[in-house]
Each structure stands twice: as C-alpha cells, then as structure tokens.
Amino acid sequence: MKSRRNGALLTQLEKNVREILAQREVSIADRLKAIEAGAKLLMIRHRIEGSGEGDDGKFFRSAAG
C-alpha cells in the first residue's frame, strides 16, 4: 500500500466532523465527541504540516522556552 501525504483522509474526516456539528438533531453527547475528534484532527494536521519545517511538532509551547 502506497502512503499518501496529500491529506485526503484527514480532509474527509474534518468534513465529516463539520457535517455532524451542522445537524440540529445531533445530541449534545455526539456533538462533544465530534468536537473532541475535531481537536485531535487539528493536532494531527499541525504535526504533519509542521514536521517538515524544523518544527518539533508540538502544538503548545511553554511561554518560558
């Protein structure tokens, strides 16, 4: 299986999270799960995009250093 770096799967997952949040009939518990999944996807995207530019891939940095 050939690895892709174009982020097609990540983009589709993000689209699915947005669709869940856009639906009025979705329960609060399911909305919270979608938000949690969206936050994880955001961290993954940051690590993928930041890893090639000398970034250490950390999403949050301490103010001291």
Image: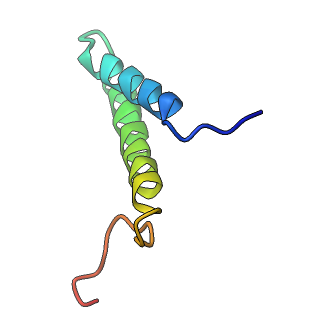
In the rendered view, how is the structure colored? Answer: rainbow
The foreground one among 58 and 6 is 6
State the residue at coordinates (23%, 11%). Answer: 24
State the residue at coordinates (28%, 81%). Answer: 62
Q: Note whether 47 is above or below 36 in the view shown.
A: below
The x and y percentages for residue 2 are 72, 35
Q: Note whether 61 is above or below 26 in the view shown.
A: below
The C terminus - image quarter:
bottom left
The single residue placed furthest to the bottom in the displayed view is 64
The x and y percentages for residue 8 are 49, 29
The N terminus - image quarter:
top right
For the image, the number of numbered tags is 0
Q: Quadrant of residue 50?
A: bottom left
The single residue placed furthest to the right in the displayed view is 1
The x and y percentages for residue 49 are 41, 53
The foreground one among 3 and 59 is 3
**Could you tell whether 28 is left or right of 45 in the image?**
left
State the residue at coordinates (35%, 19%). Answer: 20
State the residue at coordinates (45%, 24%). Answer: 12
Q: Quadrant of residue 30?
A: top left
The x and y percentages for residue 46 are 38, 54
**Could you tell whether 23 is left or right of 11 in the image?**
left
Q: Note whether 21 is above or below 63 in the view shown.
A: above
Q: Quadrant of residue 60?
A: bottom left
